[in-house]
Image (tube, rainbow, N blue to C red):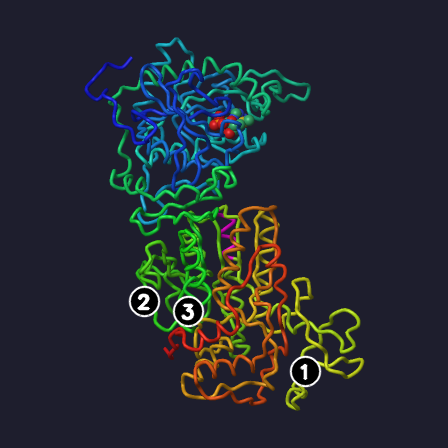
Amino acid sequence: MPEASPSDTPVAAAHPALTEQPRIAVIGGSGLYSLFDGSDDRVVEVTVPTPFGETSSPITVGRIDGRSVAFLTRHGADHSVAPHRINYRANIWALKSLGVRAIVSSAAVGGVSPDVPPGTLVLTDQFIDRTWGRPDTFFDRGSVQHLAAADPFCPSLHGLAAGALTAAGEVFSSTGTVVVIQGPRFSTRAESVWFRAAGAHTVNMTLVPEVTLAAELNIGTVNLSFVTDADAGLAPSADTPSDETADGTADTSSDSVSADLVFRRLRDAQPRIIRAIEAIVAAIPVDYEPRELIAPAEVERVLAYAVPAAGAVPADGAVPADGAVLADGAVPADGTAVVTGSSDVDAGRLLLVTGGAGFIGSAIVRQARDRGWSVRVLDSLRPDVHAAVPAAAGPAAAVPSAAGPAAAGPAAAGGAPAAGPFDDDPGVEFLLGDVTDPQAVAAALAGVTVVCHQAAKVGLGVDFLDAPDYVASNELGTAILLAGMTRAGIGRLVMASSMVVYGEGSYRRASGTGDTLRPPARQQSDLEAGRFDPVDPATGLALVPALISEDDPLDPRNVYASSKLSQEYLATSWARSTGGRAIALRYHNVYGPGMPQNTPYAGVASLFRSAIERGEAPRVFEDGRQRRDFVHVADVASANLAALDSTATGPDSTFRAFNVGSGTVHTIGDLAEALSRFSGGLAPVVTGEFRLGDVRHITASSERLRSELGWTPSVSFDDGVREFAHAPLRAAVTER
Ligand SMILES: CSC[C@H]1O[C@H](OP(=O)(O)O)[C@H](O)[C@@H]1O
Ligand SMILES: Nc1ncnc2[nH]cnc12
């Protein structure tokens, strides 16, 4: 029992419901869902909100041997949190915030070595990590820290625990290397044999990253494991006398692992395990000081991360306590990134917007910030779109990008933090880098909950020589992003697609009879002769344009279009093979403030606006009667936010495409006329010129987006064009 000392004086509690700081915590593994006597009215239950989301369970604070001790059960009180989905960061951050310095963790383990047969208590002192995709550090943004992990468990707590168990008359193994597997499945026989050959004694699913996260916050951990089973069955070996079966293999089937066996053995052993835990707790001196493996100032910085406002994360469990998916919501507590109290389920969490410095991307970033997200932007600031490029602050060892000509510019920064377009908002982290650069993508994905993929080379382009750049930027970029997401265990994606995947719009026969149909690509000779409208081959009459729906056939007619469709197919394959949820938003004609001007990739609204600004008449191609759906960029951004929300729930392995259009049909001539009128510029000139790759009419039904995601556009054509007539465009790109 510890001697009373001056530092025995209770320390003021960090939580309003507590009168004293618990310096010691017990984390209960399987079978250990409560520690204190329920009838003890001094036991207090607290729910600690964290920057990383919910803890596995509320934390109970009671007394062991006169000491205030916090208890948290790792899988939740009803064992509802699977090992790979435990929100380890939330659990450890919450304990640290209460003042905990020492953790006694309990775990059920399988024995893979004859040294630790079922029934053995083991003081684990080493691990081999076979987990993946778990957010496993507090230092993945802002400041990078590298934990010295040679002895991940605290040697002094280990010594104290060994002494306490010996004094209590326990028989135990004072050393043990655990292999931590991803779970929730158990190991194959081959894996089990391999673990043993690698020198491991036990196997478990939860000790990593729990112990290293605790160490990152300078909390010492001692682990008490109970061997419940012989894993896949001990492999025969020279030093193992085994019961042999007829075919000569070892018969350890009675101890082979099953969940039932684990829970049964834990139940039987529970009094012994609790006695051992109590003995260890009692042996920890009140003045125990953990190792300072990380500079205290860095730990303080993590502790100072802003906690989402109450209500930002529903308490009803709508957001699972899921470290792997919820990932990083941590933001510096400088007041700038604190959640505004929105009821957004993802508020405070980290959203990656690729291409977030672009016209549409930056509108998404702004709306996401308004909704309480933390946002990271990965953007290469392509010189063919972005006029002014800040100097890269990244490493000199540039990682070349495959994005073709554009890569010669700032894209080579490899995902380094850089001065960028969001410098006025510390809640936005800007990384200069290209989605075709796997290292930049890996850096950008760290700690991310959901990805909004806007980075792309857009527009009809100059000529076919643009093809490699379209394919590299859009197809290869998406493949690299999806591979990175798979590696990082991120399962939610919203991506920018385009109406161009349909090719020509949808039409009906003049008679109104029959299904909708799709005319073939227009002929040069027809266009030269001013025959712009597709005709019904059967009657020679002009076809009547109809709204296109997501189930209409896909018919990409240029390289840009095929690259967008390929992005959709990649996302479909990714969702199918990883269990992810992907949404593609097929944008119709987006316009609004911040549109890039005078590039071959700019939309028609920007070309008209630029002409008017130069004092020229907007030049309208064909006869100006081409029908389009002009949708304001703010509405496109809100569609993205609705789509991002919807990926938080619903079935896994899904891909769904949605049109994004205003629902009102206008002609290109209407747009030119309205822009001239609202800006007081020259009236448009209808030139009869044409581009072979253009389609005649294409207008969207956005019914699916409205009915399934509850989205409605908020900017009317008149209001939007009036504003756009005077709104700033993105700076002009000059030759470099
Ligand atoms: C049926 S095994 C369940 C569970 O138990 C073990 O660990 P812990 O005691 O930390 O919960 C195992 O690794 C699994 O996580
Ligand atoms: N055999 C085993 N493998 C992984 N985790 C376990 N927990 C208890 N037994 C286990």
Identify the main secondary structure in magenta: helix
**Mark found first going from the N terminus, 2 or 3:** 3
User: Which label lies toward us, 1 or 2?
Assistant: 1
Q: Give the range drawn in magenta.
A: 480-488
Q: Name the side, left or right, on which 683 lies relative to 667.
A: left
Q: Nearer the viewer, residue 265 or 63?
A: 63
Q: Are marks 3 and 1 in contact (CB under 8 Å)?
A: no
Q: Is residue 161 left or right of residue 574?
A: left
For label 2, the residue is 390
Label 2: few (<14), some or many (≥20) within 10 Å?
few
Q: Kindly report the distance in space between the C-alpha atoms of the residues bearing marks 3 and 1.
A: 36 Å
Task: Report which quarter residue 703 is drawn in.
Answer: bottom right
**Which is nearer the N-term, disc 3 or disc 1?**
3
Q: Does the residue labelled 2 lie within 8 Å of ligand 1?
A: no
**Residue behind mark 1:** 533
Pointer 3: what residue?
A: 382
